[in-house]
């Protein structure tokens, strides 16, 4: 009886204690879970050639493609807040806006004290960039002590500012200015226009912009190699761990090397005089034929800027161009190809461009769905240049060499092998000058990128130009 009484008392106490507890149990979600729950990754992103810009038909940029691939891997959409300077990016980061900041940011000791960086995806050096006219004036700096007296400006809150501040403590009579409004790319333009003597830029930023501003010159390196990373918001480590796992897998798959190849490898084709001539023809020649490229591009679903870049590589936009092998016109069609495409006059600007675009489109459709995106454009251009059969042979050889037959990064290493007997003797289409389509596509990528940036500059100029008031 006592035991029963004791059990009743204990049950009553337990019920009373339970009634005093909260009715709902609060479970805190991790940082990664919160992002996945809202199905959106909020990103502060820098509008710059190395990071993010609006391309011919889509958004693109090395870092944009990289963060897009990560978002896709965790099944969320990207929500971008676009900024135009690193100072803006860091200001929003300090205000805890967004989940991650993507802005080609070097992980300097000062920044790592203030911010949390994710995994590093690229390395750079800081370079002093000046106008090449300083050579003639015998003012091109060769060491730190030559910096005195030069008009040098860098962006606010950039790691360049920190680097120059350290130099200022070493070199007497050296000083520099800081701009809150101008981005690194805009400061490079200021140097090109001779408004200032020099600025500082990451090596990858300079390589991209040298094509837009050919007179820029690399004077010296101001730092050892530095790592680039994205800034994550403070909190638990789930997002950081997720990024490390994903980037490790992405790199092992070869996708990171392929992305690097697409955005940076073709820069090796830079030629100062060729680029200068190309800029002149952008202004004097392209406007005459732009409508035909746009018409053909729309008709065959090909970005017109790719057609224009290809045509420049083929003929330098000369309607009556002729090679020693007899190919002719703006798109350098052979007689056989012209006959196939029913192009009656290869010297007709419209006929040649339409025919070339149609043939490009035909090549595009000859590859399986596994060849997609940027790889498809490269494969179609390679087939246009060297012949579809040789591209098929290169894919077959790629398989034998344990390379990816659907990746341009791998195929561009295999194509040159088609000129070696030990490889081509067992292939269906035999010998080919396989290095040519590789150089061909690198050059087209070079011209295409300049056209894209030139169009962006023109559009910005239109937006900022105020309309004149009409006279009453």
Image (cartoon, rainbow, N blue to C red):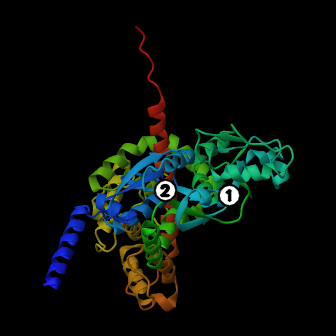
Q: Which mark is residue 126?
A: 1
Q: Is residue 38 above or below residue 284?
A: below
Residue 301, compared with residue 409, is above or below; it is: above
**At x 59% / y 43%, what residue is drawn?**
186
Disc 1: CA contacts within 10 A as few (<14), some (14-19) or many (>=20): many
Compare residues 176 and 157 and report the one nearer the observer: 157
Answer above or below: position of 333 versus 304: below
Of discs 1 and 2, which sits in the foreground? Answer: 2
How many badges with numbers are in the image? 2
| Residue 193 image offset from top left, x and y in percent | 65, 39
Residue 135 rendering spot, x and y as whole percentages: 79, 49
Q: Quadrant of the C terminus?
A: top left
Residue 21, horizontal then vertical, whole percent:
26, 63
- Sequence-wise first label, 1 or 2: 2
Q: Residue 46 location, x and y as percent?
A: 49, 50
Q: Residue tagged by mark 2? A: 102
The local secondary structure at tag 1 comes to strand
């Amino acid at each position: 009886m006592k035991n029963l009484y004791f059990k009743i008392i204990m049950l009553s106490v337990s019920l009373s204690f339970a009634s005093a507890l909260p009715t709902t149990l609060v479970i805190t979600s991790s940082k990664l879970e919160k992002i996945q729950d809202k199905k959106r990754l909020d990103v502060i992103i820098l509008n710059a050639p190395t990071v993010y810009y609006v391309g011919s038909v889509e958004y693109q940029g090395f870092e944009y493609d990289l963060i897009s691939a990560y978002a896709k891997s965790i099944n969320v959409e990207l929500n971008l807040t676009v900024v135009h300077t690193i100072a803006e990016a860091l200001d929003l980061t300090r205000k805890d806006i967004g989940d991650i900041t993507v802005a080609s940011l070097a992980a300097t000791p000062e920044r790592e004290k203030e911010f949390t960086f994710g995994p590093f995806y690229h390395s750079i050096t800081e370079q002093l960039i000046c106008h090449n006219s300083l050579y003639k004036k015998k003012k091109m700096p060769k060491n730190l002590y030559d910096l005195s007296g030069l008009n040098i400006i860098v962006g606010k809150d950039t790691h360049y500012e920190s680097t120059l501040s350290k130099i200022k403590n070493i070199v007497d009579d050296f000083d520099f200015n800081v701009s809150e409004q101008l981005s690194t790319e805009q400061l490079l333009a200021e140097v090109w226009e001779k408004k200032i003597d020099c600025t500082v830029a990451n090596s990858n930023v300079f390589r991209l912009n040298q094509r837009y501003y050919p007179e820029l010159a690399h004077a010296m390196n101001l730092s050892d190699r530095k790592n680039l990373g994205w800034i994550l918001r403070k909190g638990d480590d789930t997002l950081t761990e997720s990024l490390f796992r994903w980037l490790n897998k992405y790199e092992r798959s070869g996708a990171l090397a392929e992305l690097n190849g697409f955005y940076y490898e073709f820069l090796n084709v830079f030629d100062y005089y060729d680029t200068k001539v190309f800029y002149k023809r952008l202004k004097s020649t392209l406007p005459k034929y732009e409508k035909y490229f746009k018409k053909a591009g729309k008709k065959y679903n090909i970005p017109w800027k790719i057609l224009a870049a290809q045509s420049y590589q083929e003929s330098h936009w000369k309607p009556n161009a002729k090679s020693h092998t007899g190919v002719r016109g703006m798109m350098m069609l052979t007689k056989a190809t012209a006959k196939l495409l029913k192009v009656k006059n290869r010297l007709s600007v419209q006929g040649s461009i339409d025919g070339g675009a149609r043939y490009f489109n035909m090549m595009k459709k000859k590859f399986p769905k596994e060849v997609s995106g940027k790889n498809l454009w490269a494969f179609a251009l390679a087939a246009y240049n060297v012949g579809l059969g040789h591209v098929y042979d290169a894919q077959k050889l790629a398989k034998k060499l344990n390379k990816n037959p659907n990746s341009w990064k791998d195929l561009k290493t295999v194509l040159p092998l088609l000129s070696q007997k030990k490889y081509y003797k067992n292939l269906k289409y035999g010998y080919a000058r396989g290095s040519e389509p590789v150089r061909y596509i690198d050059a087209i990528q070079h011209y295409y990128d300049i056209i894209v940036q030139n169009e962006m500059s023109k559009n910005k100029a239109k937006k900022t130009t105020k309309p004149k008031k009409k006279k009453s």
